[in-house]
Amino acid sequence: MSSLEHPAVAKVAAALAEAGQHDAATGIRILPAEARTAALAAAALGVEVGAIANSLLFRTDNSVPLLVLTSGAHRADTGLLARLIGTERVEMADPEFVKQHTGQVIGGVAPIGHPAPLRTLVDTALRGHPVVWAAAGHAKSVYPTTADDLLALTGGTPVEVVETP
């Protein structure tokens, strides 16, 4: 089975097409090797690491999933994320929690194509790039999009995910 036929990639492509983002659905690219980090994806695509939209799943203090789409150029501040959503604690989700809530594995989590909609925050730093690349359900798959399309597609909230000095 090719990576494009992978069930999670097919689900992402269908969700993109259903949302009217046909160019994104047909633009899914299969990389020669897995790119489980923003740095690896950026190197494979020949783009700045900041143009990679990391899909990070967090677990809140009441075990509710929170999807945060961050620029690959920095790390999300979990204390800030907790304050932004009005909860006591936010922590990185473990692989089982990620698979349960996204249907995808760490390193390939897409912004969409999940079993149920997820509360989503989108890093405003992504707006600094005319094209951003997001995972498409598998660690070897990515697709081109924009920060505004990510917001529209996910129903996400634009936020700064790192503290500014």
Image (cartoon, helix red, strand yellow):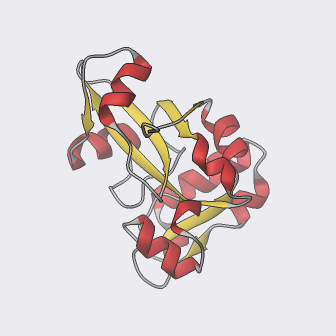
Examine the image and state in which quarter residue 148 appears.
top right
Q: Residue furthest front?
A: 165
Query: Residue 98: x and y, percent?
Result: 30, 44
Left or right of 88 on screen, residue 129: right
Q: Which quadrant of the rendered structure holds the C terminus? A: top left
Query: Residue 2: x and y, percent?
Result: 49, 77
**Placement of 22 over or under 15, stated as above or below:** below
- What residue is shown at x 39% (from left), y 75% (from top)? 34
Examine the image and state in which quarter residue 50 appears.
bottom right
Between 124 and 24, the one nearer to me in the picture = 124
Left or right of 118 on screen, residue 130: right
Left or right of 164 on screen, residue 62: left
Query: Residue 150: x and y, percent?
Result: 64, 43
- What residue is shown at x 47% (from left), y 38% (from top)? 164
Query: Residue 104: x and y, percent?
Result: 38, 52
For residue 56, say whether it is visible. yes
